[in-house]
Image (tube, grey):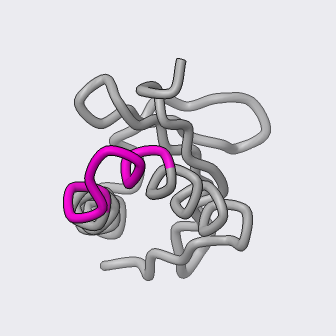
């Protein structure tokens, strides 16, 4: 069964912040990067437990050592709760 992927408001804010950081150098690259992250998060719909299990029912998955995604699995959906852009560190 394919689950629905949803982004909580904090995750949307994180994506905007990631865009802002990258857009300082290249707005076009920032758009492509954020779109790529969203597209890649769709894999959780079919493979929800692909990430590393954390406490409190959260999962963590890292894309290309650059973006860490935190999400929870419910009966009908994947709730993406946070993004961390490792390029900021």
Position above or below: 61 against 32? above
Position of residue 73 relative to residue 74, above or below, is: above
Q: Name the quadrant containing residue 45.
A: bottom left
Find residue 3 and report its image quarter. Answer: bottom left
Residue 31 in the image: x percent, y percent?
A: 29, 67
In this view of the protein, which residue sits in the foreground, 11 or 26? 26
Report x, y in % for residue 84: 55, 37
- Where is residue 85 drawn, in percent x and y? 48, 36
Queried whether the magenta region covers residue 86, the answer comes back as no
Task: Choose top left, top right, bottom left or bottom right for residue 47.
Answer: bottom left
- Predominant SS of the magenta segment: helix
Q: Residue furthest front?
A: 25
* Point 33% across, 66% down: residue: 38
Query: Residue at horizontal 52%, vertical 67%?
Result: 78
Query: Does residue 22 belong to the magenta stretch?
Result: yes
The residues colored magenta run 21-30
Image coordinates of residue 16 in percent, x first then y, are 55, 63
Please name the residue shown 41% across and 48% down the image: 24
């Amino acid at each position: 069964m394919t689950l629905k992927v949803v982004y909580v408001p904090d995750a949307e804010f994180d994506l905007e912040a990631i865009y802002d950081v990258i857009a300082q150098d290249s707005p076009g690259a920032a758009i492509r990067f954020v779109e790529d992250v969203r597209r890649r998060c769709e894999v959780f719909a079919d493979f929800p437990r692909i990430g590393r299990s954390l406490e409190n029912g959260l999962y963590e998955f890292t894309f290309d050592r650059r973006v860490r995604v935190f999400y929870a699995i419910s009966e009908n959906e994947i709730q993406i709760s946070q993004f961390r852009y490792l390029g900021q560190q």
